[in-house]
Amino acid sequence: MTTLITNIKELLQIRNSDITKVSGTEMAILPTIKNAYLVIHNDLISDFGSMENLPNLKADTTIDACGKIILPSWCDSHTHIVYAGNREQEFVDRINGLTYEEIANRGGGILNSAQKLNETSEEELYRQSEERLKEVIQLGTGAVEIKSGYGLTVEGELKMLRVIKKLTNNYPIAIKATFLGAHAFPSQFKDNKKAYIDLIINEMLPKIANENLADFIDVFCENGYFTVAQTELIIAAGIRYGLQPKIHVNQFNSIGGIQVGVQNKALSVDHLEVMTPEDIEELKGTSTMPVALPSCSYFLSIPYTPAREMIKAGLPLALATDFNPGSTPSGNMNFVVATACIKMKMTPEEAINAATINGAYAMGISSTHGSITIGKKANLIITKPIPSYYQIPYAFGSNLIESIILDGKLYQ
Ligand code: NIG
Ligand code: FE
């Protein structure tokens, strides 16, 4: 099955296969071809170039993309799409003056979602999560990481990870699963935190590894959640089961989570709303991808990740949604890209790099996703006719996507 796309106004994010991420000043460069063609063979990109060099080829399907821009699908490397119900009431409580922290201290927050999830059947959880996955696919996401962490019991965590696995099997989108049993301490372990950590390490992890349900291990390293020492213990256990760390750090406080991440070769450290100069220094020259979640900053009215300082220091940066019921009830990567430009002063080129190739890196899939490269997955966004790709962040509330290609096929 061969599909030929012709007359593409501009084809974005052309990369050689050896580029797995972009850092520092390279982030300002977004290689493109104007007036381009692209060939898809089965599920892969097999050729592309300038229309002047259009090969004489017999395609099964031809798509005319006159006036339209094509880019690789968004790679959303940090989500909590599998959850039950919602936290609308907490949203209103925050409008009325309570803080996210105060709500959590009253037993709301993550524990509220955990209670709902444990009362929901696996089938119903799948149904609710599937709706969210379909929504983000329509918004241009072609690869997504999904975390557990709203079970906080052996059964609840397994239920979440089984739902993620079922989504992986049923949808034509790359999905990576992360075990986040260390998201919060359940109230019954309030005074015996060691017992919950033992449960994670001795009961949850072996079962998860046995069923091959997770690719990564995550911990919410933050005051009031997991200390640096506890984070270290849990990620070390995950590593013993072959799970690379991807950790929540520096959301509200800089307590040393980045250092632990870097020392343990974390694939990514995520949130980073609060960054000290030492934190930035620590990340230099490492294989750990910093990930910013601007929709979370927007929704909670907390600081944005200091992208300019980090890029100036030569670091790479990825952008993700953090789609979850408490801090970011939105999985819209277009909004993330726009917000990164508007609030974090990233240029459109930097933001698109951060949401494609660097997002793919933060999920360990940049050899197959995140750029227009021969041999990579044909997961693409075709825009409506637009003047230039600047529209993507500029027209921040508009839906500019006309169609989606996943695994080489038009997704309806
Ligand atoms: O990434 N920060 C920790 N976890 C999630 C939010 C959890 C929640 O409020 O349900 C986050 O923002
Ligand atoms: Fe998160």
Image (spheres, helix red, strand yellow):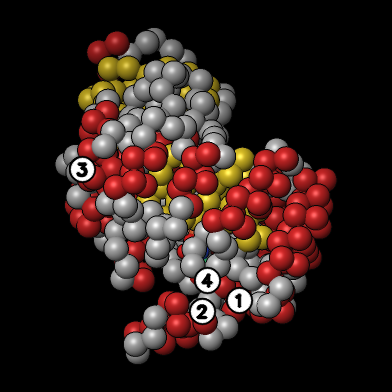
The residue positioned farthest toward the left in the image shown: 387
Image: 263 above or below 159 = above
Q: Residue at x 49, y 40 (%)?
A: 262
Secondary element under disc 4, as helix, strand or loop, is loop
Which circle marks residue 347 in the picture? 3
- Left or right of 120 on screen, residue 10: left
Disc 2 residue type (three-letter): Ala
Crowding at label 1, few (<14), some or many (≥20) Cα neighbours within 10 Å?
many
Residue 384 visible here: no
Calculate the distance from the C-alpha at mark 2 to the C-alpha at mark 4.
9 Å
Q: Quadrant of the N terminus?
A: top right
The residue labelled by disc 1 is 111
Q: Which one is closest to the eye, mark 1 or mark 3?
A: 1
Disc 3 residue type (three-letter): Thr
Crowding at label 4, few (<14), some or many (≥20) Cα neighbours within 10 Å?
few
- Looking at marks 1 and 3 on the same chain, the residue that comes earlier in the sequence is marked by 1
Report whether the residue tagged 2 is closer than 8 Å to ligand 1.
yes
Circle 2/circle 4 CB separation < 8 Å: yes
- Looking at marks 4 and 3 on the same chain, the residue that comes earlier in the sequence is marked by 4
Circle 4/circle 3 CB separation < 8 Å: no
Crowding at label 2, few (<14), some or many (≥20) Cα neighbours within 10 Å?
some
Give residue 3's position: percent from left, percent from top: 47, 26
The residue labelled by disc 4 is 224
Q: Which one is closest to the eye, mark 1 or mark 4?
A: 4
Circle 1/circle 3 CB separation < 8 Å: no
- Left or right of 332 on screen, residue 86: right
- Looking at marks 2 and 4 on the same chain, the residue that comes earlier in the sequence is marked by 2
